Image (cartoon, rainbow, N blue to C red):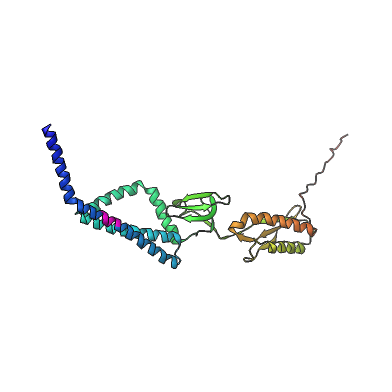
Amino acid sequence: MNEQLQTLEHAKRTVLDLAIQFGPKLFVALIIVVVGFLVGRWAARLAGRGLARVQVDRPLRELLTRTLHVFVLGLFVVMALQNLGVELLPLIAGVGLAGAGFALAMQGVLGNLIAGLTIIFTHPFRVGEYIAIAGVEGEVDTVELFNTTLRHPDRSLVVIPNRKIVGEILHNYGSIRQLGIVVGVAYDTDLSHALAVIDETLRSNSRVLKDPVPVITVSVLGDSSVDIALRPWTVVGDYIAAQGEINKEILEAFRRHGINIPRPQREVRILQAVGAG
C-alpha cells in the first residue's frame, strides 16, 4: 500500500515538474499557432481582394490564397516548435519520409491535384462555357483543385475527376452553341422565297443571336424533298428551348406562306406474273 502511495506521489510530482517546466512554453506555443492562423487568414483575404481587382480567375485565386494561408501558418508553427525547444532537422527528415509514403498511397488524389493545377494555369475551358469530354457534356459550373463540375442540360451535376480531363480530347463550345436543324420543302417550291421566310423567322426569334449570322443553305436533294439546313447560334442556356421554338415557328410560317413540307412517298408497283389467271 505504501509503495502504491509513493508511486502515485512520484507521478504527481513528475507531472507538476513537467507542467512547471513546459507549461508556460506550451501555452506560448499555442498562442503563437492561434496568432499564425489569424494572421494567415487575414493575409489570404487581403491577397484575395487584390487578385480579384486584377481579375485573376477564381480557381487560381483560391489556390494562391490557400497556399499563402498555409505558408504563413507554417512559419508560425515553426516558431512555436522552436519555442518548445524541438530539434527541427530530425523532425523535417521524419516528415519527408512520412510524406513520401503518403504520396505513394495517395497517387490518385495527387494526380487529380496536378491535373487541377494544369487546368487552372492552362485554361482549356472557363466557368460558364459548354464542354464535352470523357463521354459527358455540360456547362462548366466549378473548377476545383481535385475535380470539375458540369451542369447538365437536365439540371443535374456531373462531377469529373481532373485526371480524367487532362490528356483527353476536349470539345469546348464556349458560351454559345450552334443549332443544327433540317427542314424539307417540295421540289416545286420557290427556294428563294422559302429561304427568305426561314431567314425572317430566325431574325424574329429572340433566342437566336444576330452575331454570328445564322447559316441557311440547301443541304441535300432528297428522294421526295429539298432539304434546307439551318445553323443559327444561341447562348448555351437557350440551346434546347431555341430548337423547339424555331421548329414551331418555321412550320407556322410555311403554312402562312403556302410552302409545302412533303411527306415521304413510295411508289409500289404490283406486277402480274406471266401466265397467271
Nearer to the camera, 88 or 46: 46
Q: Work out whether 105 lies above or below 239.
A: above
Nearer to the camera, 34 or 130: 34
Is residue 33 shown in magenta?
yes
* Quarter occupied by residue 203: bottom right
Magenta stretch: helix, strand or loop mostly: helix
Instruction: Give the side of residue 19 with respect to residue 163, left or right.
Output: left
Q: Quadrant of the image for the N terminus? A: top left
Q: Work out whether 4 lies above or below 232.
A: above
Q: Residue at x 37, y 48 (%)?
A: 107
Is residue 152 shown in magenta?
no
Give percent across and percent down for residue 131. Answer: 53, 56
Q: Quadrant of the image for the C terminus? A: top right
Residues drawn in magenta: 30-34
The answer to whether residue 226 shows anywhere in this view is no
* Quarter occupied by residue 77: bottom left
